[in-house]
Image: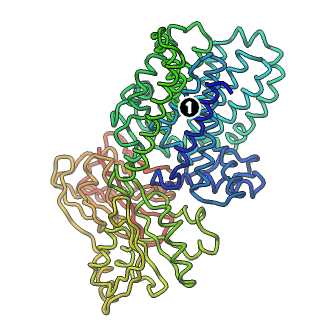
Amino acid sequence: MSPEFALAVAAALLYLISRLWMLDSFPIFFYSDEANNVWYGEQALQNGLLGDDGAWPAVYFKWDSNRWTPAITVYLHGLAAALFGKSIFVARTVSVLLTLAGTLAVARILKEHFRSQYWWASILLAISIPAWFLYSRTVFDAVASVALYAVFLLAYMHYRFRSARALPLAVLAGALTFYSYSNMHALILLLGACLLVSDFRYHASHRRIWLRTLPLLAILTLPFIQFRSLHPGSFLENLTAIDSYWVQEISLPAKISQYAQTYVQGLNPFFWFVPKAQQTSILPNQNLAGAGHLGILMLPLISAGLYSSLRSLRSPAHRIVLLSMLVVPVGAALDSIEITRVLAMVVPALILGVLGIEWLAARLPTVPYGVQATVLAIALTAWGLTLTRGALVDGPTSYLDYGLEGAQFGAKQVFQETIPRLLAEDPEAVVVMTTTWANNTDEYPRFFFSKEDQARVGFGNAHDYLVTRLPVGPHVIIGMTPPEYRDAVASPLLARVEVVSMIYAPNAEPAFYFARFEYAEGADENFRQQDRLRLQPVESIVQILGQSASVSYSRLNDTDINLLFDGLKETVVRGDRVNPFHVTVNFPQPIVLQEVSLTVGSIQDFTVGLMVSSPASPEPVSISKRFTNQGLDPTVTFQFPAPGVIASTIAVEITDNTVGPEAMIHVWEVSFR
């Protein structure tokens, strides 16, 4: 065994240790998307690869009610679940093994196609890249797509520099990458087009291989063609679901300009190397605290590698690496640059990092290779171990918000540890778990529980028990966050709140309470009084269009009516279990009304009624329109013919058609123009 190979084996073992150590405990979140990768794979295998939409084999899955995504690697997770059971550790181990395969593919690219003496160092570098450390320990489809992207580049380079007969393998690897993650569609298509042009002479000289490969390419495009025929509007629906600027009412030049700016942001060194700089992650724990996505120590290595590659631009291998870097943001730029959407940058970054090491090592000709390799191996190992220890030991307490807007801590502790124990202790027990601490919590039971136990777990909120009399008793256990627990304890409606179990956050503060409730005497009369009060409209004075308008509206749930007219779609008001939700605006001075726009919460089926009155007109103008499948927080607009209508009173009514007379209708904005 050569010294380089021994270093590679040791580095691979260290990579596995850094990923498998405390794998089910860090990251401290376990998102529903991670659980869904396993569940969808399990269902697809049980259904004989048949999708819910009739597609065979199922390659695209309906991740949300309004979003389809390719996720071909769910089959690996489904198979692992069938063989080893469903658990966080098993699911994340599949991802770890996939990422190891991708990391080894990068090492082989460097060894075989760049003749690098330091090819083994790419494995050690992979240990130390903060974003890769964090996400390679998760079950996100973006992670699997990065591993497949590395395999595709290896297969293509083998075709390009070793044997043209490897073309079918490259095509297959490209197709798997294409079907692994939605952002890979644009990336693979553009990279394929660039490689077709860049290496055209080579392709033309192997026309026979291409002709023999075309049938395979045609077969591999069938799932995409089938999906597009079954869901012709899916692309627009996905853009609507993420509220992309491409579906907003701005001009085409403005959209193109924004696309260009967003694309450039995906290549911005500040985004990649500087801690907390230009990072647009939705949640703070999507980054390792105090570290840029690629890590500041990678900056000189990648810079040197980039300089070396640009000087070698005539080299096809260097051109491939540069192209593989430039295409990474093309899909993400359709909306915004989030680290998961551009995680594929890890692959060219590793290659450029090692090429940078080669370039720097060449500047030290008097230092023997053995000395350089030893020092480099020790330094990179220490770097990797330091990052690993820091992430696992300090990471859980780096962000102290463990709720919905923070770490979303608790899936393992709630669904894998606590609820199963509570159900086992009392065969008649049912658990009602709060939903306010994480996204899509109702999707966890199908991952963690048997069908029998799923029937014993429901979802709600302690607040529900304080506004409506619900069944309580010795067998009903309510899971709460600390604020919900404090409200329950302080409520005169409850005579007793008996805590049966607690879960603590990594900072040793209480994260969840599990308790039994008992209503106080006289609670029924209190509930009746609350209902009478809730149905009464509220009146306020609000500044609208420069006037102090009188506004009458349905009672709100802990929000301020002024937020409805503040011109910001980031602020929201919530109706307090009223359906429909009403708001009526009376202007002291009539206005000329040309347009009414409303941004409402994500309701699959809703109706908006509009009535405009004027002292000059005996009959009000009434409009009612029903909307379905409008996507995430849609904005709907009513326009009046020019020059508009005179309006002194504008009444808006929003009805959620999917539920009964009680609904928490969310309204982000109402605007008049």
- Judged from the image, the secondary structure of the residue bearing numbered disc 1 is helix
Residue 496 appears in which quarter of the rendering?
bottom left
Q: What residue type is labelled 1?
A: Ile
Q: Quadrant of the N terminus?
A: top right
Picture residue at 29% right of the left edge, 43% below the top: 673
In the displayed structure, 269 sits above or below 114; it is: below
In the displayed structure, 242 sits above or below 103; it is: below
Residue 559 appears in which quarter of the rendering?
bottom left
- Colour mapping used in the image: rainbow
Q: Nearer the viewer, residue 615 or 519?
A: 519
Q: Which of 283 and 125 is in front in this view?
A: 125
Residue 500 appears in which quarter of the rendering?
bottom left
List the residue tagged with mark 1: 123
Whether residue 623 is visible: yes
Whether residue 580 is visible: no
Residue 107: percent from left, percent from top? 61, 27
Residue 393: percent from left, percent from top? 40, 50
Picture residue at 80% right of the left edge, 14% below the top: 207
Q: How many marks?
A: 1
Q: Nearer the viewer, residue 104 or 11?
A: 11
Residue 173: percent from left, percent from top? 70, 31
Residue 546: percent from left, percent from top? 17, 47
Picture residue at 41% right of the left edge, 24% below the top: 299
Q: Is residue 434 left or right of residue 316?
A: left
Binning the other alpha carbons within 10 Å of mark 1 as few (below 14), some (14 to 19) or many (20 upward) gives: many
